[in-house]
Image (cartoon, rainbow, N blue to C red):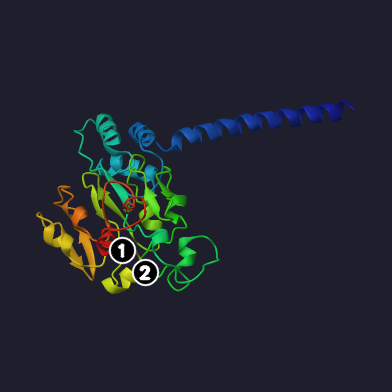
Amino acid sequence: MNNVIQTMLLSSGLMIIAGVLIGLGLGFAANKFKIKVDPRKENILKILPGSNCGTCGFIGCEQYASAIVEQNVDISMCRPGGQNAANKIAQILGKESKNVERKVAQVLCSGGVRCKNDFVYSGIKKCSYSKKFFQGQKKCKYACLGFGDCVEVCPFDAIYINEYGVAEVDFLKCTGCGLCVKSCPQKIIKLVGCEYKVHIKCSSKDRGAFVKQICSVGCIGCGICAKVCHVKDIYLDSNLAVMKYDKCDNCKVCETKCPTGSIIFGNGTAKDKKKLGQTNLELNLVK
């Protein structure tokens, strides 16, 4: 009996000693081979928004933070973080801050219910799925499909489907991360500098006669806006008026002259005329 007890005690003691030795060994190894993390990277990572949008050109915020510290990359590439993040990062690195151009997403369509449907779509309510069926349910194959793929990916709740069934951006919330741009199968969302307030809310390259038949607020390619733009910031491309967004001074002359109401000043989609949804062209026809 005594031999059994002695054996048990000896075994227990050996196990305790072995555990202590293993613990010491692991502690030594962890200390010896631990990866040293630059505290600046950790501090920068706390400043970045954590949306991992990829607008900076890196996979996520952590990779961008590493690149800033280890590769000395530009500290002003985080659009969601904006100027505030760039200023704080500059302080951490002891550098001068750089100006960050703030951009917001702009949906270049305002059709929605004012654009006729080609067929009744009853499939999965996603733009990417709808597009697989004859390029979407709208007669205009360049139109916003209105199922909100862009809404789902926005981490800032800055985009929604408005009362006309078109994706619309809340400029006060938008950080310009570009996730909605990537998610849109129609490729009609564009990042635009905040200084530009005038937008051509149409992406159709169909001929004007066809556009008139299917959408009351579509661009008909008449070219009036290009002619009246005194800074030459508008040009025609395949039946569509397009803004360069490099000289526009927001004079609004193009908006007042547009016969279909497809040019908008400020946020939102094409506004109803006299609360009846009538466009300039329709009002002229009434006259």
Secondary structure beneath label 2: helix
Circle 1 Cα neighbour tier, 10 Å, few/some/many (<14 / 14–19 / ≥20) = many
* Quadrant position of the C terminus in the picture: bottom left
| Residue 161 in view here | yes
Three-letter amino acid code of the residue under disc 1 = Gly
Q: Nearer the viewer, residue 277 or 33?
A: 277
Which residue in the structure is indicated by mark 2? 214
The percent position of residue 12, horizontal first and vertical second, equals 74, 29
Q: Residue 218 carries which label?
A: 1
Image quadrant where residue 61 sits: top left
Q: Residue at x 46, y 32 (%)?
A: 31
Secondary structure beneath label 1: loop
Q: Which residue in the rendered view is the most extreme toward the front?
A: 287
* Quadrant position of the N terminus in the picture: top right
Three-letter amino acid code of the residue under disc 2 = Ile
Image quadrant where residue 80 sits: top left
The percent position of residue 174, horizontal first and vertical second, equals 35, 43
Circle 2 Cα neighbour tier, 10 Å, few/some/many (<14 / 14–19 / ≥20) = some
The percent position of residue 90, horizontal first and vertical second, equals 24, 33
The answer to whether residue 89 is above or below residue 199 is above
Q: Which of 131 and 40 is in front in this view?
A: 131
Tell me whether the residue at label 2 lies in contact with that at label 1, contact meaning CB atoms closer than 8 angstroms.
yes
Q: Which residue is drawn at 62% across and 29% down?
A: 20
The answer to whether residue 68 is above or below residue 151 is above
